[in-house]
Amino acid sequence: MTKVLPNDMVNILYIIATFAFILNLSCPSELTNTNAIVLILEYLGVLFVSNYIIRKNLKAGKKSKERYLAFFLIGLTVSLLFLHFVWTPNLPENSKDWGFDPQRYYYYSSMFVKGTPMFDGLNYFGIVFFYIGLFYVFGINPLVPLFINSLFVLYSVVIISNHFFAIGGKAKYFALLLLIPEVVYFNCIPSREIICLTMATIAIVKSYEAIELGNKKSYISVFLSILLMIIIRPPMGGGVIIAISLFIALRGHFKMKYLLIIAVLAIIVVQGLSVSSSLDTHQTDTGSSLTEAVSDRISGDNEEDATASYSSNSLARLLMPHNPVEFIVFGIIRSFAYVIIPPGLLLNPVEYLNFSKPGTEGFASVTVILMMIYLPAVYRNIRRKIKGDNSFKIIALALITLFFLVGVFNTNIIHQRYRVVYDLFYFSIVACHLSISKKT
């Protein structure tokens, strides 16, 4: 039997990915205004840019770069197939499974570009205006969010891989970050999750380069990425700022210039919230602001969550806070619930491992299984190394901060997508663990 060489395998994956792309050239007319030729050029652009990101930015050998490119193409193919068979058919407003926030983001963004702004029932508009910008530049089509998200994730994986290579990380494990199931899923859709994941990764890795390695240019990437996070999902941007501040406080050798950095980050928060508020034209009966909403969460006044439909023995219902103490205690419990296999997955695996619906169930279920398997390893590595190397410390602090922020401020636990923001931090620690424990 003829042995398939790495280059041959990559070429085969290019062909498979291209067939999956061709399937998506057929799209309902109400979902697109983009010519097929333009989409083909954009697809070729994605292939060129992905190759460039890996060849020019990944600090690894040729064989490892081939591995990253192969895994990127595998993930891209899965995303394209899911887009064609599941996501696009459920994008029209009259589909039976319509109503998921990312479906709304696509609808509102495309309607705005077509000249008919429609924002009823949506609270945060930063993400909508983000995709409005993309649709103006690249055209309206379900492929556009997939192209952008896939490149965002690839760049994020490359820079966090480089970060860990310096302390013994092995490319063969870090390349697997490109195949995190729920990340591959969210690559398909217009959502805040991939943007927050990317911006959080850039902010944390580049802040380490700026603070620890003295790379002053990295400050620009830090500030811009946090600003975009604040505009799109304010709590996550705040969590990244807390992580960076903790790193500055715990690394030792404190200098006055770091006070200036923290002050600039505070200014970014204020300006980001201002932009976010100006974009948010949604008017509620109470006219509550973001600050009031946060205050209501902490005090236990969660009217919107209280209206959610829960069964009498639902864990989400039992963990709904009614006062500030429960807000903290239940929040910590919810944080761990995100990385523990839900009982429903064990009782009804067919439903939870369903990949035929536009929701997150199937991909999220596989991801949480992997998270639970490696939870002890993640805990041990953080416990042993957080006081040591600063390059590991900053990733651990980012994971810890976002881990608890997601659980505390999401007062119901029906949205697995909120944890996506820390997926790369979580699984990069897993990859670091495998690199060290399996020296080959």
Image (spheres, helix red, strand yellow):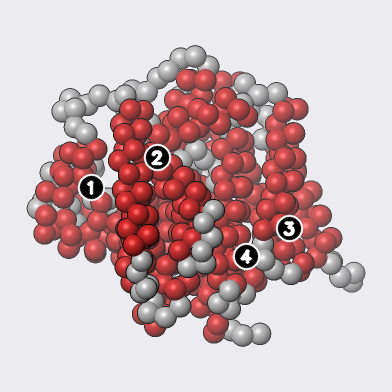
Distance from label 1 to label 3 (Cα)?
49 Å
Mark 4: which amino acid? Ala
Residue closest to the eye, 378 or 262: 262
Distance from label 3 to label 4 (Cα)?
14 Å
Residue closest to the eye, 398 or 6: 398
Give the mark, 1 or 4, whose residue is nearer the N terminus: 4
Q: Which mark is residue 398?
A: none
Residue extending furthest toward the top: 115
**Of the two numbered discs 3 and 4 in the rendering, the one whose residue sits closer to the viewer:** 3
Distance from label 2 to label 1 (Cα)?
28 Å
Which residue carries the number 1 mark? Answer: 310
Q: Are marks 1 and 4 in contact (CB under 8 Å)?
A: no
Counting from the top left corner in percent of width and height, residue 29 is at 61, 21
Mark 2: which amino acid? Ile
Mark 1: which amino acid? Tyr
Give the image quarter of residue 12.
Answer: bottom right
Identify the residue at horizontal 24%, vertical 38% (top origin). Answer: 290
Image: 377 above or below 414: below
Which residue carries the number 4 mark? Answer: 175
Residue closest to the eye, 430 or 347: 430
Within 10 Å of disc 3 (Cα), the crowding (few <14, some 14-19, many 20+) is some
Give the mark, 2 or 4, whose residue is nearer the N terminus: 4
Which residue carries the number 2 mark? Answer: 232
Question: Can residue 306 be seen from the camera position used here?
Answer: no
**Of the two numbered discs 1 and 3 in the rendering, the one whose residue sits closer to the viewer:** 3
Identify the residue at horizontal 89%, vertical 71% (top origin). Answer: 1
